[in-house]
Each structure stands twice: as structure tokens, then as C-alpha cells.
Amino acid sequence: MVSLSKTLCPYCGVGCGLEVLPPAQPGKPVARDSEGNPVWQARGDRDHPSSKGMVCVKGATIGESLSKSRLKHPMLRDSLDEPFRRVSWDEALDRVAERIQAAHSTFGPDAICMYGSGQLQTEDYYIAQKLLKGCLGTNNFDANSRLCMSSAVAGYIQSFGSDGPPCCYDDLERTDCAFLIGTNTAECHPIVFNRLRKHHKRTRKVKLIVVDPRRTPTAEAADLHLAIEPGTDIDLLNGIAHLLLRWGFIDPVFVDECTRGFEKFAEVISHYPPERVARTCGLRIDDVVQAARYWARAERVLSLWSMGMNQSSEGTAKVRTLINLHLMTGDIGKPGAGPFSLTGQPNAMGGREAGGLAHILPGYRLVKNPQHRAEVERGWGLPPGSISPIPGRPAWDMITGLETGEVQVFWVAATNPAVSMPDIERTKSALRRSPFTVYQDAYYPTETADYAHVLLPAAQWSEKTGAMTNSERVVTLCPTFRQPPGEARPDWEIMVEVGRRLGFTEQFDLANSAAVYAEFVALTRDRLCDCTGLSHARLAAEGPIQWPCPKGMTAAENQQSKRLYEDLRFKTGDGRAQFAAFHSRGLAEPTDSGYPLVLTTGRLYGHWHTQTRTGRIDKILKLHPEPELEIHPRDAADWGIEDKTWVEAQSRRGAARFRAKVTRAIAPGTVFVPMHWGALWAEQSEANALTHPESCPASLQPELKACAVCVVPAGAEPSAQQSAAGKRPAVLAASGQDAGSL
Ligand SMILES: Nc1nc2c(c(=O)[nH]1)N[C@H]1C(S)=C(S)[C@@H](COP(=O)(O)OP(=O)(O)OC[C@H]3O[C@@H](n4cnc5c(=O)[nH]c(N)nc54)[C@H](O)[C@@H]3O)O[C@H]1N2
Ligand SMILES: Nc1nc2c(c(=O)[nH]1)N[C@H]1C(S)=C(S)[C@@H](COP(=O)(O)OP(=O)(O)OC[C@H]3O[C@@H](n4cnc5c(=O)[nH]c(N)nc54)[C@H](O)[C@@H]3O)O[C@H]1N2
Ligand code: SF4
Ligand SMILES: [Mo]
């Protein structure tokens, strides 16, 4: 019998260590899922430095999702109105290579796009960059991280000269004041929250501030909850800075010696007295002052943020405004302090290291930098000038490129854009116009499969070996411990096969994922994210290791410096961090009399994104049986809405139906819906039917956290609505299609 495997949880960016046990255990019956497949059992790994044995419901139930409804064979069709036919790998890969070749010679390299995901492993990400940016000569690789982390990336680069979260999880237990803004950590990064909460409970003087228009479980635990109006974060942060400066709680030596741009910043924040801030943010003056007082009294402030900051048309400005507070108080580069962006997906961090966005290259390099391009071209054995100096299309521009016909080949891997992109009806009509879409996924059906010409079955976590990096820069090797179903293959291997067919045999002469990883780490030499000391062999022998880990660094040395910028020298030209001064520009789509409420969207504890895994786990379906719209009693009364009745939310782009949850846990004027229900799981409950694609000009991240809506009673329950736990997906139930058949 196979024994226990140590690996990483493949869900969120907390990156908890898991121990996985095979289905057959001595003296116990073999556990099986509802389709009769044997189920591997997952539990926390006490030796993992990030999670120390803890897991949440998602990690604990991962085993149940691995075999159900998998895509097992390559499938092909010439047009979207035909059924798929099963083909050999050779036929599918030949077709993909031919279409890429044809688009390349007729329209040029920029007619080809790949849209990837923070759920790819680092090896997959790296090979995708080499294929697209190196061999094909287009920077059109972008990932769902554009909808997720790109404002954090842009903010770090602009303030510190490089991407890279400076903090580590030990800071959760070393801080005096945790400032959580735009993050529902308790539900979305539960084990980070557990660590922080224990520290908070243990030490009374530690303060916890939560800034969120909703009274989330995270906010419930706070000493101070600031239920701000969506989109007013910059005002609040400038207001806190105003008071800190007024009271003299700044670190003048740090400001003088380690930063630039303080004067302009001081001028801007002078316009943010608490009275004005309280009015703009919809808060009590006392609460604004109290937040500043907590910052002032703390020796070490740790701020944590995620989508409430990033998913905004001024996401980068929000991130930089938060970083300003750390710069003025010198709260960085020391234990318990710093601006800590919580990564969403399990390997969004690894993606950044591998260059997995349209404007970056492996090793935290930039497409626009000629020296960076030359270094990567040399590493890839390609002639100078192979990498284009022009950043590629960010995610939403791939959709508009399909609309205009500029995108001829759209290759999607490990993401489900027919649910997760903004303005979903527009996205779907663009997908319908695509001349050729390749969809490489682990599961079938998914909503995006409907729009594909080719389906490529991907081996997922547990069936392939690769590295993933979590929010605190700890790299964990995820080994293979199960067979992939049917003919599924690792993502990197599929891309290598296409690369070879396009004639790049030398570039893709790679024996296994350890060889891919070795090539990737060589490109991080002397960069901030130096991983040259890491290899699959070392990670397997020593367990998870944090970067930077240059070649020759021992485990003991690695343990000694857990934070970036401890020497207070930043990666800018002169080594100083950069203040930035912003006034808020407000929401991209303000409310008006027709659409008087701000809709915000987000996550629930049990579900993962578009439910490809969690929608198939009974325990989780019972936790969250149906999509609910949170609305304040005052608004509910104004719009004639009663608790638990069906309502329709309408925006300028579309409508969606939810069950009303009338609750004081949301600020008046704001409503919330979960993002998890795509067309497969409920008829007409798609959050993104409502959202718009307006983006931050610096990070190009869409404002998925706010759009203007009205909410009206919807009458009876929609007929095809999936309303009870454990039911099959709505579309499948209607069509009688067997999910496992592909
Ligand atoms: N259970 C679960 N966990 C997950 C995921 C999942 O699908 N399910 N996904 C993972 C991924 S990829 C990500 S990116 C993270 C996301 O993790 P989070 O960012 O914590 O999750 P969200 O629910 O998207 O949004 C967080 C909060 O932002 C608030 N918010 C909305 N607008 C504003 C605003 O203008 N200002 C402020 N301050 N707050 C605002 C919302 O009310 C919401 O409570 O979660 C990761 N973890
Ligand atoms: N309204 C609204 N929309 C949002 C958000 C929001 O807060 N509100 N959040 C945005 C954010 S932060 C994110 S991260 C996105 C997430 O949105 P998506 O990326 O679309 O969501 P997932 O369901 O995680 O899709 C991952 C897909 O990868 C497949 N998969 C899993 N493992 C593998 C593998 O190893 N290989 C391959 N090839 N496939 C695999 C799964 O089956 C699944 O189909 O949604 C974004 N959209
Ligand atoms: S907190 Fe995140 S990484 Fe940890 S078990 Fe839960 S989903 Fe997995
Ligand atoms: Mo995300």
C-alpha cells in the first residue's frame, strides 16, 4: 500500500501543508465518493511551517473532489454548434499547432493569446512563458491573477521597486495591531486568520481593525469594524495618515533616510481631517480617530489586504496609499510589521515569479526593460529581439480582442472565464465569436467548455509533480500520488508538445518537471525572488523553503531572514521607497436614481470560485445550498423586499436572481452576492451578469467589487434554480448528460 504523501493544499494562497492518505487503510473500509471512486483522505501537516497542522473545510475535503466529473480524453469539434468527438492526443495537438502556425503567419504573433491561472504550478507557468513570450514572440499570456493580484503587484513595484510581499506569517504573532482592509480573512484565508486570532485573544493589548462594508466573520472578531462605503478606502487611509502626522506619530529618521516624496504626500493628506473623512466614508468621526489611535499606539502594525483593495478601478492607488502609512511610521522590514497582500490562489505567487502576466517576465523582470528581455532571451537560447518589447493583452483585452477579430487563437488553461470574467454576457458573446478556442481543464463540464473547439484534459494537483509558492513566499513541492484519469496530462507537458510541433525542439527538450523547475530557478539568479538554491530534490528532502534562497544558502541561514527589506534598502534606483499621493476618484460606476445601490461581490467560506471542485462535495453544498443577496433592512424596506424571498438584481448590463438575506451585517446602500454560481450551478444567479470591466489604469485590474444596481422582488423561485443541497448542477439535471462521460 502507498503510504502517506506530504503536499500543499491546492486551494487558497495561505498554502497549508497537507498529509494525504490512500483510500485503503488497514482495518478500515475503502472510503468512496458519491460516484463510487476511492477517496484519498487529507489532514493537516504539523511540520508545515505556514500552517502547523491546521486546515479548513476546503483542504480537509479535497479528496472527495478529485475523481468526480473529470475530463478524461482530448475532444475536438470544428464549430461550436457541433458535438465534440473524441480524438487522440496527436490529432488534438496537431490541430492546436496548425491553428497557431496559421494565425502566426497570417495575422502575426499577437493574434495568439493564452489565458492561464494561479492554479497552475510554477512549471506550467514557466513553460507557458517560454512558449508564448520566447518562441512565439508575443507577450499575450495573462492569468486570472489580473482579476486578483495585479493591483498588489503594481503597488509593490511602484512603492518598493519590485513585486514581493515583504512579510511572513510569523508576523501574525508578532504584531501589536493588525489592520485588515478589504479582506474577509476568516472565510477566505482561514488559517492565516486562525493564527492571528489566537494571538489577538492571547494578548489583550493587540488590536484588530477591520475595514469592510460588510460585517463579515472577520469583522465580528475585530476591536474596531469600520463599515465604510465601497470605494472610499483612499479617503480613510489618507485620514489616518492625517491624524498620525498631526499627532507627530511618524518615524522621521526612516522617512528622511529611506523614502522619497514625503512632502507632496504630506500636502495631500492635509486635506483629510477626520470630519471630512467620516462624511465621505459613511463612518463616525470617533471611529476614524480610534483607528488612527490604534495605529499610533502600536509599535508594530501589520496590514493585510486582498480583493476589497485590489479589485478596484483605483486598486493600485489604494495599495500605495496603504503602503504610505507603513512608510511614514517605519512599519516595515521588522517583525510584526509591514504591508502584507494575501494571495488568493495557491500558486498566484509562483506565477508572478515565473513571469505569468502580460507585462512581466520570469524572475520578477519587466517586458519593457531591454536588459531584462536580453537576460531571458539568453536563458532561453533565443536570438536577441525574440521577446517583444510591448506588454501583451491583459485578461479583459483578450475578450475585446475576440470582439474585434484581433485574437484568432484563444487558449485557456485552469480558469473558467465564462463565469469569472466581468460583464459575463459580453464575455460569452465574445467567446462565441472566437475563431479557435482551446480549453485545457481538469473537469467536465464547466461553463467555458461550451465555448471551446478543443478540450485538452489536464492532470491536476495530486496527479502531477510541481512547485507552488504561498503568500509568505514559502515554496512547497506537490508530488504525484495518484494516477491521472483517462489520458489527462500535466499542463506543462501539453504545452511542451505543442512547442515541439511548432519546431522548438531544442527549447522544449525537457525530460520531466524537475528539469523544468531547474531551468526556471536559473532565471531567478540575483533577483529579489532568487530561488537558485531550490530544486525538486531539495524540496522533497527538506520540505517547504521560503525564498529568497540563493544557491548555497543553508536551511539555517534561510530561517534567519524571513522578511524582505530588513536592511531598509528597497529595489528602487536609489534604494529608497516611494511615497505616492492620491485623492480618491470614487467608483467607476457611481449609483444614481435608476441604480441606487452598490453591488459588491465575493466569496463564501466553503465554496471555491466557480465550484468545479466544491460544487461536487456534499458537505460544502449543505453549508451553502443557494446564492443569497445580502441587503440591509432599511434598503429591503425601501424596495419592498422580504427576507428569504427571491429578488432580482439589475445593472446596466444584465440581471441575476438570488434569495434575499435581510441583514444588518451589510452597510445600508450596499448589497453583496457571492461569485460562485455560474450557469451550470444555478439558472440566472451569475454575479458577473451585473459587473462591469472598468479597470485600474495602472494594474488593469477590473473593478469586480462595485457596480450600480437596483434590486426588486422577483416573485416565485426560478424554476431551474438549484435550491437543495446535493442536487446535480442545474444544466446537467436538465440535459441528463453524464458528467463523467468525457
Ligand atoms: N472560501 C474561499 N476562500 C478563497 C477563495 C474562494 O473562492 N473561496 N478564493 C481565493 C482567492 S483567488 C482570492 S482572490 C481570495 C479573496 O479573498 P477576499 O478578498 O478576502 O474575499 P472577497 O470575498 O472577494 O472580498 C473581501 C471583502 O472585500 C469587501 N469589500 C468590497 N468592496 C470593498 C471596498 O471598497 N473596500 C473595502 N475595504 N472592502 C471592500 C467585501 O465586502 C468582502 O467582504 O480568497 C481566496 N480564498
Ligand atoms: N464577480 C466576481 N468575479 C470574480 C471575482 C470576484 O471577487 N467577484 N474574483 C476574481 C478572482 S480574484 C479570481 S482568482 C477568479 C477565479 O476564477 P476562475 O479562475 O475562473 O475560477 P476557478 O473555478 O478556480 O477555475 C479554475 C479552473 O481550473 C481547473 N483546474 C484545476 N486544477 C487544474 C490544473 O491543474 N490544470 C488545469 N488545466 N485546470 C485545472 C478547474 O477545474 C477550474 O475549471 O475569479 C475572478 N472573478
Ligand atoms: S486555509 Fe486555504 S490553504 Fe489552508 S486548508 Fe483552507 S483552503 Fe487550503
Ligand atoms: Mo483571486
Image (cartoon, grey):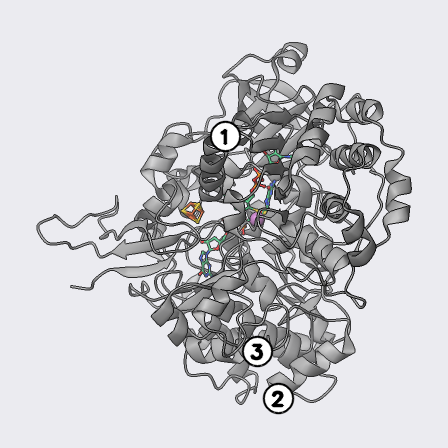
**Up-down: is 21 above or below 598?**
below
Q: Which residue is mark 1?
A: 627
Between marks 2 and 1, how big is the CA–CA gap? Answer: 51 Å
Q: Alpha-carbon neighbours of circle 3 within 10 Å: few (<14), some, or many (≥20)? A: some
**Up-down: is 544 above or below 609?**
below
- Residue 466 seen in render: yes
Label 3: which secondary element: helix
Question: Which-is-in-front pick, marks 2 and 3?
Answer: 2
Q: Which residue is mark 3?
A: 98
Q: Position of residue 170 (x, y in %)?
A: 50, 50
Please name the amino acid that badge 1 sits on.
Pro
Q: Which residue is mark 2?
A: 381
From the viewer's side, name the closer residue of 304 and 28: 304
Q: Residue at x 24, y 52 (%)?
A: 37
**Earlier sequence position, callout 2 versus callout 3:** 3
Please name the amino acid that badge 2 sits on.
Gly
